Image (cartoon, helix red, strand yellow):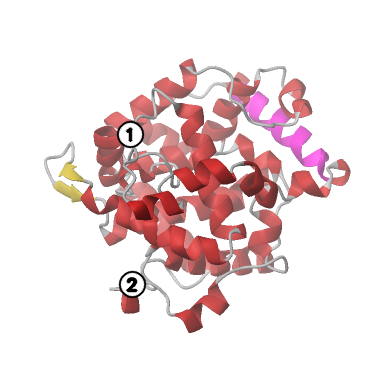
């Protein structure tokens, strides 16, 4: 399996990214902390991913712990270098045992290629859209480079070379078709929305001007940021109400956030390396770290992208 599913050593030199890459420069802007609800809902609205989250996730009990571990995962993937290679294999191994029955009666397996690739796809979409609304909107050439780089990083976790389209134009068609044809309001969607609505304020370094501008607390800013990024079609399909007041808040938060670009220090524009240093011990103890190789028993949701609980995803 290693020879075909995962990239060879020769390929790794072309897939791992460094400071010169678009992924490195755009992959950990602090303002993207406003966006994580968006990819999470995209993931759990997929029937296979949603079933896995319902069967294996403890998101409702520990939503912000889960979010921090998601940040560990995406930071490691971009900024971890060789550590990301081993962590990617551990992540795939973790999900081998996740199986069950979906709400529609179909059996699912966490490593179904289509569902597994969809989770990676939602992160790509969230980065590009997150910067458009809250950060530094990417130029078309930057979007193309970012897509190529992040698609390549998917190989580290076992996303097949041909499981996602080759270019951004193809990706947009694939993404829109999946939203229209596949996504639905699963039980996991309800669980996630309920958990976010009733959670305590998140322990995230969201710049205060972002939510002060809209006169809402940080938790509400996360809700408005995530739901506001959804297309009207997706909100309608999932039955998520959206008011004019919330739309006004979304615009205010976005405008305030984008205006911060000239004054934000580099450490706020690229937080990934600091995130890895700060969370190094937690990562080492989890399934992405060396402890996993010693057979340490961990929760299905200890690490991974939002919704990777079944990496049914």
User: Is residue 208 shown above or below 135?
Assistant: above
Q: Where does residue 69 sit, x and y in percent of width and height? A: 50, 40
Residue identifier under label 1:
57
Q: Earlier in the sequence, mark 2 or mark 1?
A: 2
Q: Where does residue 305 sit, x and y in percent of width and height? A: 45, 46
Residue identifier under label 2:
5
Q: Residue placed at 45% from the left, 66% from the top?
A: 156
Q: Residue placed at 38% from the left, 46% from the top?
A: 308
> Which class describes the residues within 10 Å of circle 2: few (<14), some (14-19), or many (20+)?
some
Q: Residue furthest front?
A: 294
Q: Where does residue 68 sit, x and y in percent of width and height? A: 54, 37
Say left or right for 275 vs 15.
right
Task: Please tell me whether mark 2 sits on a helix, a strand or a loop.
Answer: helix
Magenta residue span:
246-261
Q: Nearer the viewer, residue 78 or 54?
A: 78
Say left or right for 169 vs 240.
right
Give the quadrant of the N terminus: bottom left
């Amino acid at each position: 399996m290693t020879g075909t599913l995962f990239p060879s050593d020769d390929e790794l030199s072309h897939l791992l990214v460094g400071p010169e890459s678009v992924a490195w420069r755009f992959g950990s802007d602090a303002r993207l902390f406003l966006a994580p609800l968006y990819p999470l809902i995209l993931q759990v609205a997929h029937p296979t991913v949603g079933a896995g989250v319902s069967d294996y996730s403890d998101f409702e009990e520990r939503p912000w712990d889960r979010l921090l571990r998601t940040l560990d995962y995406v930071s490691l993937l971009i900024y971890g270098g060789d550590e990301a290679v081993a962590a990617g294999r551990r992540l795939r191994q973790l999900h081998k045992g996740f199986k069950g029955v979906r709400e529609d009666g179909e059996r699912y397996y966490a490593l179904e290629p289509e569902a597994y690739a969809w989770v990676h796809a939602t992160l790509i979409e969230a980065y590009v859209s997150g910067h458009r609304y809250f950060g530094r909107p990417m130029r078309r050439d930057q979007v193309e480079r970012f897509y190529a780089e992040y698609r390549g990083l998917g190989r580290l976790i076992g996303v097949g070379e041909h499981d996602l389209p080759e270019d951004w134009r193809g990706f947009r068609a694939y993404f829109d078709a999946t939203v229209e044809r596949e996504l639905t309001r699963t039980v996991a969607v309800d669980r996630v929305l309920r958990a976010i609505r009733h959670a305590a304020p998140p322990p995230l370094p969201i710049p205060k001007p972002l939510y002060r501008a809209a006169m809402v607390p940080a938790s509400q800013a996360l809700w408005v940021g995530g739901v506001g990024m959804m297309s009207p079609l997706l909100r309608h399909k999932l039955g998520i109400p959206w008011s004019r007041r919330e739309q006004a808040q979304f615009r205010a938060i976005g405008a305030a956030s984008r205006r911060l670009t000239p004054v934000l220090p580099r450490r706020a524009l690229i937080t990934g390396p600091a995130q890895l240093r700060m969370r190094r011990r937690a990562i080492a103890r989890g399934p992405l770290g060396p402890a996993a190789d010693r057979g340490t028993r961990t929760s299905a949701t200890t690490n991974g992208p939002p919704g990777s609980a079944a990496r049914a995803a």
